[in-house]
């Protein structure tokens, strides 16, 4: 579905606009909370003309600084419209999705999970190996689903890792690595040339293996817990096709304290493989999967090395966790850089 998705938050949070998307007369809209990163997430409550209410949340790119990223919302719109209903994942229930034909702005209106008793995590939320295994179970279900069997054409899911290389040239990447975020590491880890070379290999392999739908950004800040403790996934704006190892390595490296990761990562990879087998999938043996996992850790390290619009403590912790994993597994050397 393509429908108007205005960039103006005041319009979106108006009774007139809400009446149109909800199909019932709305007489009042009350904003409850607004969270702004690249996108804006605004929780709001609508009151209908019969006195009943609904708790909702809209995600869009409303701030002036975010307007240039508005087309990222298109990927989430496509995911929630075409894939999410068939995947059996724990994701928010959407009541409206739309892409503005003039601006390309993708917008999502979903049920307010906070009002439903869910807990949104922060990027630094403590996460245990058991919780990590539960999230890997969700990722296994995601990777199990063939999007072509659902929607046929999947050009919008084309691998895009090569574009992330073009986003930050080597000189700029080195400046970011030298701004203090890579302080825990030796110079050979905080080396833009080596990191770009390793990521280039990861990107080439990903383009050659468009086997699964991957979330691409499953740190704790993009997770929530249902009232009974099940993990759910949000923020699907980097969804694409690629190897399963991108998600598994990123998630394990991003959410776990390095000591917990080192103790549990091999068992977690085995649990992920078993979850895929239980779904009827053919999966590699552990030795081959372990090699893929250790190489794919470079993906998360690169993504956080180029990150700029995030609170400094969050940035530094993720660079430290993922860089430590790359260092521990000698991923650069494994990839020939």
Image: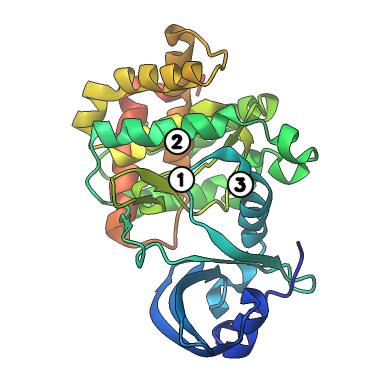
Q: Which mark is residue 138?
A: 2
Q: Is the Cβ of the residue at disc 2 closer than 8 Å to that at disc 1?
A: yes
Residue marked by disc 3: 85
Residue 23 location, quadrant? bottom right
Disc 1 versus disc 3: distance between alpha carbons?
10 Å
Name above or below for residue 180 compared with residue 309.
above
Q: Secondary structure at mark 1?
A: loop
Answer left or right for 144 relative to 253.
right
- Place of residue 226 in the rendered image (x, y in percent of width and height, measured from the top left): 34, 51
- Place of residue 65 in the rendered image (x, y in percent of width and height, measured from the top left): 54, 75
Q: Secondary structure at mark 2?
A: helix
Using the image as rendered, state which of residue 66 and residue 199 is in the foreground: 66
Using the image as rendered, state which of residue 39 and residue 29 is in the foreground: 29
Residue marked by disc 1: 90
Answer left or right for 117 relative to 142.
left
Q: Secondary structure at mark 3?
A: helix
First-in-chain label (2 vs 1) = 1
Point out the residue furthest to the front here: 50
Name above or below for residue 87 compared with residue 59.
above
Q: Is the Cβ of the residue at disc 1 closer than 8 Å to that at disc 3?
A: no
Answer left or right for 298 relative to 103.
left
- Place of residue 81 in the rendered image (x, y in percent of width and height, measured from the top left): 66, 54
Residue 85 shows in this picture: yes
| Of labels 2 and 3, the one closer to you | 3
Disc 2 versus disc 1: distance between alpha carbons?
7 Å
Residue 26 location, quadrant? bottom right
First-in-chain label (1 vs 3) = 3
């Amino acid at each position: 579905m393509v429908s108007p998705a205005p960039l103006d938050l005041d319009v979106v949070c108006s009774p007139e606009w809400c009446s149109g998307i909800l199909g019932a007369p709305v007489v009042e809209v009350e904003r409850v909370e607004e969270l702004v990163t690249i996108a804006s997430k605004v929780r709001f409550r609508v009151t209908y003309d019969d006195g009943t209410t609904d708790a909702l949340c809209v995600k869009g790119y409303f701030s002036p600084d975010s307007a240039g990223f508005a087309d990222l919302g298109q990927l989430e719109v496509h995911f929630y419209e075409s894939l999410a209903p068939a995947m059996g994942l724990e994701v928010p229930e959407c009541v409206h999705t739309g892409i503005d034909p003039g601006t390309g702005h993708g917008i999502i209106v979903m049920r307010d999970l906070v009002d439903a008793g869910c807990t949104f995590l922060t990027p630094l939320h403590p996460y245990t190996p058991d919780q990590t295994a539960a999230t890997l179970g969700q990722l296994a279900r995601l990777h199990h689903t063939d999007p072509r069997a659902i929607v046929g054409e999947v050009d919008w899911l084309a691998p895009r890792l090569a574009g992330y290389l073009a986003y930050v040239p080597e000189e700029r990447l080195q400046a970011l690595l030298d701004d203090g975020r890579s302080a825990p590491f030796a110079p050979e880890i905080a080396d833009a040339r080596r990191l770009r070379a390793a990521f280039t290999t990861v990107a080439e392999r990903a383009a050659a293996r468009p086997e699964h739908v991957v979330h691409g950004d499953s740190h704790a800040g993009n997770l929530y817990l249902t009232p009974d403790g099940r993990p759910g996934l949000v923020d699907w704006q980097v969804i694409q096709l690629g190897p399963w190892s991108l998600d598994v390595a990123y998630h394990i490296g991003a959410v776990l304290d390095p000591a917990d990761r080192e103790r549990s990562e091999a068992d977690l990879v085995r649990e992920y493989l078993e979850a895929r087998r239980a779904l009827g999938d053919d999966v590699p043996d552990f030795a081959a999967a372990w090699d893929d996992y250790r190489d794919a850790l470079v993906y998360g390290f690169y993504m956080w090395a180029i990150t700029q619009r995030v609170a400094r403590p969050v940035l530094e912790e993720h660079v430290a966790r993922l860089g430590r994993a790359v260092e521990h597994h000698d991923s650069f050397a494994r990839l020939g850089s």
